Amino acid sequence: MGRLFGTDGVRGVAGVELTADLARSLAAAAVAELAPTGPVVVGRDTRPSGEWLQDAVVDGLSSAGADVVLLGVIPTPAVARALATGVPGVEGQPSFGVVISASHNPAPDNGIKLFGAGGLKLGDDIEDRIQARLADPRPAAARPGVVAPADDAAGAYAVALLATLPHRLDGLRVVVDCANGAAATVAHAAYAGAGADVVVVYDEVDGDRINAGCGATHLEAIQAAVREHGADVGIAHDGDADRCLAVTADGEVVDGDGILAILAVDLHERGRLATDTIAATVMSNLGLANALRPHGIAVVTTAVGDRYVTERMRADGLTLGGEQSGHVILAEHATTGDGILTALHLLARVASTGSSLATLASIVQRLPQVLVNVPVLDRDVALTALRPLTEQVASELGTSGRVLVRPSGTEPLIRVMVEAPGDGQAAAIAERLAAAIR
């Protein structure tokens, strides 16, 4: 068996790669490895398969002796928050959490994500040990665990988010695209509770159309909604609401780099940006670092994946980090990417300054970026052969741009990313490198 866990849990087509038997076995293996002393919290997004996968996960957990608290349909970061702060009305600190979601993937897919004590994603080594236990199933516990639902977990989560806000959103008209996913259970309470005049769209909860033509992967939907409703800002979440992207009143996209820049300057001005440094992945545009440098803010880079951003933040004691895709970690308030939390703080900056989102985001002057995916038979061989040319091109660009060549973590591809002062130059360099691989 190859490695089950990808960059964010175990994913596959529900009922095909991700079966009830696998979900049940993974849950039981997690109990065996993590040895919970408190309850295990379980949440899911809106996918139809989430119900029977949740049943399988709960069966695996309880048969292994773990007590289970069901949070229902709720954003992924709400599960992480419950691990960090506890569940109102539930005795004992939760030991670990399970999220049944495939994030931005289409409705037929689903996934299982695991969070450890305190709300942190598990490390690769722990995931590997859990997978290893699948080959040695344990007998059922002498006492099955108790399963109980939480009382209004979504409402409690919204209240907790509102308690973090530095400024209310009164006077802002905001359209929120819930991607027909988990954000639908929280969005109106959170944004309206903060004072915004909020219009919620794509908020179906049956899950059949999760991420379908909407949400953070289909920004044309929120762009159209902003124009239709005359909003100041549009916010788009993905299926499990652990990230967000934004659009201005004119429909211009503000990606994770833009959001990070705005929040970094805000925290810096309020004296809350630890060491005046943020963490971002190697895929962030060079324009982000260029924008923050005049403010005395540094950017450190990590591998792609919000877990690696979080690890670097914890190692360096940083308070802000994230990805271009919209995963943003505000460490003062959360242990993982939280799309609704991020959006609320972004909107609070807009409201407190009286500036438009477009004005705030304009500090980031993006360098033209070209990404080419090249199929290969052996990623390691291709990378080794390409290294001299990559170094030569990087030397030619100097500080005016950059080259990033890396293997895909999930497919037999080499990803070539080039940033340069002009679109034509970036495209030409990317094609030069891709041709050498081919």
Image (tube, rainbow, N blue to C red):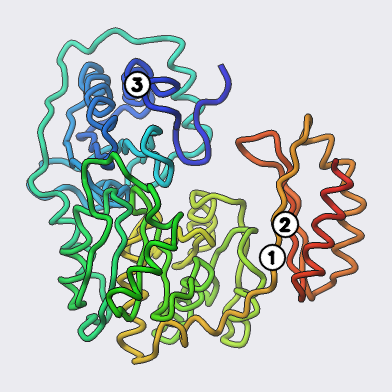
Residue nearest the observer in this picture, 140 or 108: 108
Relative image position of residue 435 (x, y in whole percent): 87, 48
Q: How far apart are the two marked residues, 1 and 2, measured between alpha carbons?
A: 7 Å
Q: Is residue 417 above or below residue 266?
A: above
Relative image position of residue 179 (x, y in whole percent): 33, 53
Give me the residue at 11% from left, 42% from top: 150
Give the label on residue 32, or none: 3
Amino acid marked by disc 2: Met
Relative image position of residue 206 (x, y in whole percent): 22, 41
Q: Alpha-carbon neighbours of circle 2 within 10 Å: few (<14), some, or many (≥20)?
A: many
Q: How far apart are the two marked residues, 2 and 3, measured between alpha carbons?
A: 42 Å
Q: Is residue 284 among the parts visible in the rendering?
A: yes
Q: Alpha-carbon neighbours of circle 1 within 10 Å: few (<14), some, or many (≥20)?
A: many
Q: Left or right: where does residue 173 sit relative to residue 264?
A: left
Give the label on residue 417, or none: 2
Give me the residue at 23% from left, 64% from top: 200
Pointer 1: what residue? 369
Q: Is residue 96 among the parts visible in the rendering?
A: no
Earlier in the chain: of badge 1 and badge 3, it is 3
SS for callout 1: strand
**Quarter of the figure that contains the N terminus:** top right
Tag 1 near tag 2, CB within 8 Å: yes
SS for callout 2: strand
Q: Is residue 293 above or below residue 307?
A: below
Q: Is residue 53 above or below residue 427?
A: above
